[in-house]
Amino acid sequence: MVQTSTQPEQPMQKKSDPTGLPFYKLLKYAEALDWILMALGTIGSVVHGMAQPVGYLLLGKALNAFGSHIDDKDGISTHMSVIQDAIGEKLGHFLSCFATFFSGVLIAFICSWEVSLVTLFVVPLILLIGATYTKKMNAISAAKMIYLSEATTVVEQTISHMKMVFAFIGEDHAIKSFSDCMDKQSVISRGEALIKGVGTGMFQAQSWTVVTAGRSSGGNVIAAVMSILFGAISITYAAPDMQILNQAQAAGNEVSMVIQRKPNISNASGGIILKEIEGNINIRNIHFAYPSREDKVILQGFTLSIPAGKTVALVGKSGCGKSTIISLVARFYDPSKGVILIDNHNIKDLDLKCLRQNTGAVSQEPSRFAGTIKDNLKVGNLDADDRQIENAAMMANAHNFISQLPDRYLTEVRQRGFQLSGGQKQRIAIARAVLKNPPILLFDEATSALDSESKKLVQEALEKAMQGRTVILIAYRLSIIVNADEIAVIENGQAKEKGTHNTLLDTSKFYNRLFNIQHISVVRDERLAAS
Ligand SMILES: Nc1ncnc2c1ncn2[C@@H]1O[C@H](COP(=O)(O)OP(=O)(O)OP(=O)(O)O)[C@@H](O)[C@H]1O
């Protein structure tokens, strides 16, 4: 009898997991997640590193877009810092935390019991990489801060002295200074982003290498490191970022509206370039309200003629629109009705650079830029040599006081520099306008009280600067006004009365009263000085 083996068929043994772990496949996913985490972390770091240049690029665009809308400058810098903060540190941080949380929770869910073992391996490596990384980053941050503060200074002073920059056609110079700082900062930021990316990558790669050396439980160890070190706590760090991201979205909408706005008055619009301007000014039936307060009409039918080489003084109550007329002649704004002609050309048809090259403005608050006295004077003419600068300073009665400063023309002014007095600031502003040598001078005198010596020096400087130019003068001192070829009294947005000092004393109540008030105070000052 042949015995046939009828052994029951053994069920096929499943191929065993090489690690012997029950969650082998899941651990493979964990490794994949680790790579994703590394990639997200790197992207977050790069976003962070690139954010500042992007923020400043936006700010630069906004700056260009201001054009005639110079009234918007106050809010824009606040918006930009919110956006910069959000797309910089906060977005990078948020991405990184979220990725860490997501991966960490998932991996920890799979295997959390090996945490302590992995931590023993990983901590020394984290410390080593962390120390090297921190050293590098500190050096980079210090260098970046220097360029950043330079760029911030350029932006801050360009925006706060916008009118002055436009008046002296300094846009290109300001943009170039800004771009130079940003180029340097951009190179450093790229380096920073790279080091951050490589640092994060190295950290992840080292963890992974050590972990895989452990073979049997590599995936578990990675999962545990992620979950213990980052996952659980990271989400709490990400929550406050959401609030900043929401604020940035709102600010971004407003900034993009400014960037997309087409300025009515722009250098790019071209126009007639006059070879020489004589300086005849004709202001005809001007109506004007500021764009930010359209309901308040400042000028309504203002008319004034100033022949070339003559001086017209504007007088009137505070807020009647004297400075506004100067702003309109320099074309910081356009009137809603009426025209302003220079040598019979509507200023709207003239090339803006040409117009501003031919007008010199000395404003109520003379602007000072960071740098030396020489830098401040050269704003009037970037190509001026030392001799021309000194001549302009002499004409403006500024040379004497500059010569007595510790570093003469190279003395630093503004932050932490030499503090100029009111009269010195005005004389620097006059010298700057003289250096530009324009046929038209727009002088808006500050009401700030100067001592009588300063008043005398400023007045002399002004009289010399006015010679041979067409001048619109806003002055509060009769001693300056009386010599004007014509004086216009502004009331209700119009030039109500016009004439010389002598005729207005008889015909204008306002002027007569102004003269009497000032005459009394002049006599009082003289008595005080004599006693
Ligand atoms: N950028 C602006 N936006 C809105 N309103 C403005 C602006 N600048 C001036 N104003 C307003 O326009 C009016 C005229 O101002 P302007 O400076 O021309 O007067 P002013 O006669 O020169 O005054 P003051 O003698 O005090 O210097 C004022 O009511 C002022 O508040």
Image (spheres, rainbow, N blue to C red):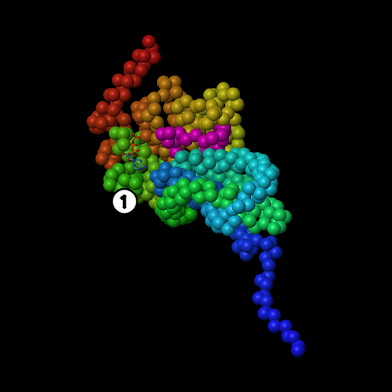
Q: Which residue is mark 1?
A: 337
Quadrant location, the N terminus:
bottom right
* Residue furthest front as drawn: 1
Q: Which residues are magenta?
A: 352-381
Residue 453 location, x and y as percent?
Answer: 44, 20
Assess whether residue 373 is covered by the magenta stretch.
yes
Residue at (25% x, 31% y) in the render: 510
Residue at (55% x, 37% y) in the render: 378
Secondary structure at numbered mark 1: strand
Say left or right for 380 vs 484: right
Q: Viewer-proximal residue, 345 or 166?
A: 166
Residue 140 location, x and y as percent?
Answer: 64, 42
Say left or right for 72 vs 144: left
Quadrant location, the C terminus:
top left
Say left or right for 212 vs 223: right
Residue at (58% x, 52% y) in the render: 227
- The amino acid on which the numbered mark 1 sits, given as a three-letter code, is Lys
Q: Viewer-proximal residue, 462 or 289?
A: 289
Ligand 1 quadrant assignment: top left
Task: Relative to 50, say whether 151 is above or below.
Answer: above
Q: Viewer-proximal residue, 107 or 476?
A: 107
Task: Relative to 141, say whether 97 is above or below.
Answer: below
Q: Viewer-proximal residue, 246 or 368?
A: 246
Q: Is mark 1 within 8 Å of ligand 1?
A: no
The answer to whether residue 167 shows anywhere in this view is no
How many neighbours does mark 1 have within 10 angstroms: few (below 14), some (14-19), or many (20 or more)? few
Residue 50 location, x and y as percent?
Answer: 57, 51
Say left or right for 511 vs 391: left
